[in-house]
Amino acid sequence: MRRRAGLGAIQKHKLEQEKYKDKGNEIQENQLEQMTRQMEVFKVNLEEFATKHKNEIRKNPEFRRQFQEMCASIGVDPLSSGKGFWSVLGIGDFYYELAVQIVEVCLATNYKTGGLISLNELRTRLIKARGKGKQHQEITQDDLIRAAQKLKIFGSGFMVVPVGKGQYMVQSIPGELSMDHTAVLQQVTHSNQAFVSVGYLRRELGWEEGRAKKALDHMVDQGLAWLDLQNPSEKLYYFPSLFNACINSSN
Amino acid sequence: MSETEVEWPWQYAFPPFFTLQPHPETRSKQVSAWKSLILEYCQKNKLFIIDVREAHQLPLFHNSAINRKLDPTVVVSILSELSKSGNAGALDKAKHRWEIYWHTLEEWAAMIYDHVCDNGMQNSVLTLFELSQGEDVQDKEFAGIHTDVLIKALRVLEGERKCELILSDEEQGVKFF
């Protein structure tokens, strides 16, 4: 049977379409409303949770990390919310305080390391500087990375540079480190010695001589590396920030 | 000369410390570390004179453990830096021989004059030997001071009219006022 094809049929079809659309919108709105409500509830719960466990959050690093992750999942950044509820919590304060201490440690070691410090070393020094008065708050690498990342707002002066295998270095002098420079730092970190050479980078990374030389010379120009011309086979580039005797010295 | 144990700074074990650094900022850190190390080393070892030509015989400029030496021209440039603050002085035009003043001549002069005043020896004559090796000075910082350095310090006092040097072939002495 052939379908009717008349004005009435077209109008009817149009009407149906509109009804579907309305229904669709309605459902969507419902869902959005529900979601919004759920999020609100979740946020309120999170806030309650945070207030209730404030001390726990400040004291227990594992708790702190999980709390941060929870916040991140709903798009709340307790560090950047300085106003209202979150400021009462003092979660932000905890990280601000850390950030300030990170800057202090970096400034205190800059003159010998040239502005580069491994996160481990930073942590050791920072914990030592905090002393025991702070109710033995345990500071983890994760806390330090979060706090140090907040320092980015001051421009390129502070950067957390991942050097692989869960290790990080914190750069506290202006000047961008490119991928190549980061790769050099990775090599130095994992070579278990405080130096590399053009030859070493060619072997390990398969770089052209020019590329290796350019990267290393740049790091000398940044004050991050020292040149040793007395090695019999080739020039060595030393990094005081990764030289144990330098790291361990108190002055 | 007997070696006194020097507490070497970390840089002493850092091989590039013995290569003059090309980067100006790094170099200035390096030079200032060398300056303090030289003064500390000389003070601990009561070393008043360094001959740059023999510098490598001193562990100061030659760390045999890591097989690194500081080039004599670099030694000269660091000593020249030290001379700017009155902590060193070249003894010849070629800058081979240097006196090292871990206390500046003015500081030595003040110490000696304090000692003289404390013991009421104004208006008396002392031999240079008494001043540097005498029994009453054994516990003094300037005990064992090199005669040439002592004379230079006394010249400072002479300029302030606090003493007069008597230097003849037979005896070397000083009269304090």
Image (cartoon, rainbow, N blue to C red):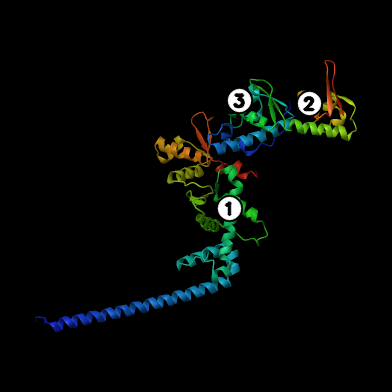
Q: What element carries label 1?
A: helix
Image mark for residue A222: none
Distance (Cα) linking label 3 and label 1: 40 Å
Question: For the point 64% across and 43% down, which residue is it?
Answer: A249
From this view, report whether residue A16 is shown above or below residue B34. Answer: below
Residue positioned most to the top: B169
Q: Which residue is drawn at 30% across and 78% down?
A: A24
- Secondary structure beneath dot 3 equals helix
Q: In which quarter of the image is residue B104?
A: top right
Quarter that holds the N terminus of chain A: bottom left
The reply to whether residue A124 is in sight is no
In the rendered structure, are the residues bearing label 3 and label 1 in contact, judged by CB atoms less than 8 Å apart? no
Using the image, name the chain to which the residue with label 2 belongs. Answer: B
Classify A234 as above or below A1.
above
Q: Mark 2 points at which residue?
A: B155
The picture places residue B151, in percent across and down from the top left corner, at 78, 24
Q: Which amino acid does label 3 sit on?
A: Pro
Q: Name the residue under label 1.
A: A103
